[in-house]
Image (cartoon, rainbow, N blue to C red):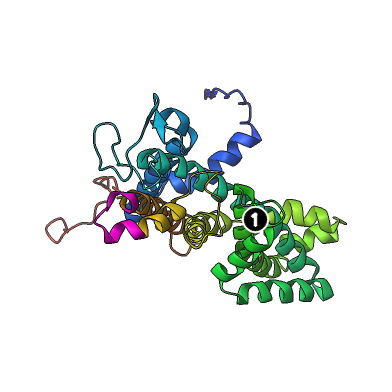
Amino acid sequence: MSQLSVEPVEEPREPAPQGGRGIRRVLSPVRSARGIARILLWAGAAISVLFVVLAVFAPWIAPYRFDQYSAGGHPFPKQGAPDATHLFGTTVQSLDVASRVVFGARTALEVVVQSVVISLLVGVPLGLVSGYLGGWLDRSLVLVMDALFAFPSLLLAIVLSFLLSGLIGGTVTAAALSITVVYIPQYFRVVRNTTVSAKEATYVEAARAIGARPITVMRRYLFTNVVQSVPVIGTLNAADAILTLAALGFLGYGVQPTQAAEWGYDLQRAVADAGAGIWWTGLYPGLAIVLLVTGLTLAGEGLNETLNPTLRTRPLRRVLLPPLPATLAPRTHRDRP
């Protein structure tokens, strides 16, 4: 009489939260990055995090305020060389260069975050609606965005900054809005072109066939598939926004010096010092711009090689096959009768 073997039945596990699965799915390509993509990504992230820490904790890291020119009743020296009291020296206005550099990181972070977020909130929905609905709305939006994209980015930012200076002054928000108009067409074009291709997919046709409304199709079926390249563009735009902000400050159209510290303005004031051999007033703000732009660019390139399926490479795993049993091993001429 044969005996039946009963295998233990595993108890059903509780499914992981949807949010956790979504976060793990998004971060999975980042964790699996290998080679040069991993080096670029983590190197850029480390440099960017350093400046984020400087920006967030600027009041505690900087030895003085960005507009402070005296301490304890004693004024700072004008164009003083770096020493133990002023590690990066002082400017012609008797301002501490180290404090200006640290607070300049906060200004740069505020402008970049505001400009990128506003560009995303405007460009991505417009591109999604334009690509899905088409018709006269699509043609009108494409015409407007192409017209904006045809202008040189710096010239467009200068014009808008000049217009906003009479309304809200040379504040951080004005500088962010001036840079925002440069990047909205980029997000619009990328999302719109991807939406035009994705709306003909089978799953979108199936959603329409069951009676899903256009807003539901765009929100549930198209949005997650057309924004895959947006993080890469956002990172690269953040690096470009740093340069645009510095250019506006250098030309005198950026943040006013009484509002916040800004690296481009400090470079403009340091031009006259360079001819007199005073190198510290322009070296450290310029070095901060180069480092932050390099960090954001490296992070963007690393994300591109990690998230882009055409560039992403997966590590090859070595497969070891078990040896064949003696009964299945191929016989040689010696084993033959």
Assign the magenta stretch its main secondary structure: helix
In this rendered view, identify the residue nearer to me: 156 or 191.
156
> What crowding class fits label 1: few (fewer than 14 Cα within 10 Å), some (14-19), or many (20 or more)?
many
Is residue 224 something that shows in the picture? no
Extreme residue toward the left, this view: 334
List x then y, in percent, for residue 138.
77, 72
- The residue beneath circle 1 is 177
List x then y, in percent, for residue 14.
63, 26
Q: Where, quadrant-wise, is the C terminus in this rendering?
A: bottom left
In this rendered view, identify the residue nearer to me: 322 or 21.
21
Task: Label 1, secondary structure: give it.
Answer: helix
Does 317 lie within the magenta span? no
Q: Residue at x 73, y 58 (%)?
A: 125
What type is the residue that disc 1 sits on?
A: Leu
Which region of the structure is painted magenta?
272-282
Q: Quadrant of residue 36?
A: bottom left
List x then y, in percent, for residue 154.
54, 68
- Left or right: 112 in relation to 219: left
- Left or right: 300 in relation to 39: right
